[in-house]
Amino acid sequence: MKSELNLTLITTCKGRLHDLQKTLPIMIASAAREIVVVDYGCPQGTKDWLKDGFPEVKRVYVDDDPGFNLGRARNLGAEVATSDWLCFIDADIVLQPGWAEWVRNTLQPDCYYRVHQDAAPDRDGIWGTVICSREAFMRTGGYDVAITGYGGDDTDYYERLGVEGYRESPLPPQLLQCIDTPHEAKTTFTQVKDTQQSLKIGHLYRYIKYNIHAVLGRELNLPQRQRLYKYCRDAVLNNDIQKPFDLELRTNMHQHRAIVTCKLQYTITAMPDRPSPNPVDN
């Protein structure tokens, strides 16, 4: 009998119980050390279903948010995980034969693993699955909870793993299968219902955030990121992407505390597919 995998599978559920009922038994049979399910206020009775049928599964319950924040849900799942490796996986992903052997023989501490878009261009549902070490998760600070809409949270996390020096390595797409889900179901519990609009907001947010990071040498704090995300959401929804974003920062200059006010003016003619980590002319 082969030993268990030193890996925690972390999945989330809000309105996806019908998918979780199909995928959770396969996750349990995968030889992972533990399974964590974050019930993010699921209205379908996920809490009772898990309690009655799967006592071996670690459960996290969120009851203070009528919407859905994937980044926050995944971060909460990671907080209770005990394995050296974490796998973030959506409730509609079915693990395929060979998964456990691949994990057992592949993982290296300086890498993170995900399916690259070029390897499965017609299967975007599996792009959000990622495996990283606990150390990598802690160094990045986890997912950016300022991203509240559909899309962008996983790409943002991958890019910050890269900034921290972790190498992207391929997760074979044949090891994952996504249950077909209508696009509109992905935004049921988010403020912006149009998936393309939501993706544009995520692209713009990451683009500006990484430009600011390149200038400051550090990431914005959470209240600043939340204000920036709201700015990007308003800009996209109102079709106004040329208004300035004002940001007040407190920083030390030559051992004296000063207040620095930055006024940023971005003129964008097209939304980039991926954010640039390099500053642009303002």
Image (cartoon, grey):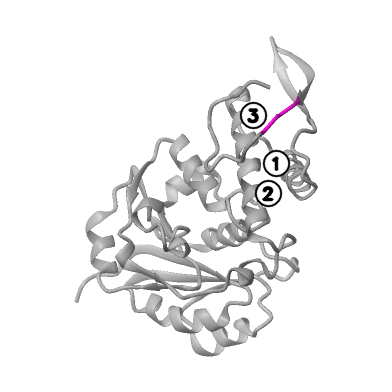
Q: Which residue is mark 3?
A: 212
In the image shown, does 146 or 110 lie closer to the viewer? 146
**Relative vertical location of residue 260 with respect to residue 155 in this rendering, above or below:** above
Q: Earlier in the sequence, mark 1 or mark 3?
A: 3
Residue 143 lies within the magenta run: no
Question: What segment is highlighted magenta in the picture?
Answer: 264-268
All told, the count of numbered labels is: 3
| Residue positioned 37% across, 51% down in the render | 118
Which amino acid does the dot numbered 1 rest on?
Arg
Q: Spatial distance from mark 2 to mark 1, Cα to Cα?
A: 6 Å
Residue furthest front in the image: 269
In the image shown, does 254 or 237 lie closer to the viewer? 237
Q: Which mark is residue 1?
A: none
Q: SS class of the residue under badge 3? A: helix
Q: Earlier in the sequence, mark 3 or mark 2?
A: 2
Q: Which residue is mark 2?
A: 146
Spot occupied by residue 158 in the image (x, y as percentages of width and height): 47, 46
Spot occupied by residue 82 in the image (x, y as percentages of width and height): 44, 61
Q: Are dots 2 and 1 in contact, CB under 8 Å? A: yes
Residue furthest bottom in the image: 52
Which amino acid does the dot numbered 2 rest on?
Ala
Q: Which residue is mark 1?
A: 225
Q: Is residue 33 left or right of residue 277?
A: left
| Residue positioned 61% across, 41% down in the render | 271
| Residue positioned 19% across, 77% down in the render | 1
Q: SS class of the residue under badge 1? A: helix
Q: Main secondary structure of the magenta part?
A: loop
Q: Spatial distance from mark 3 to mark 2, Cα to Cα?
A: 15 Å
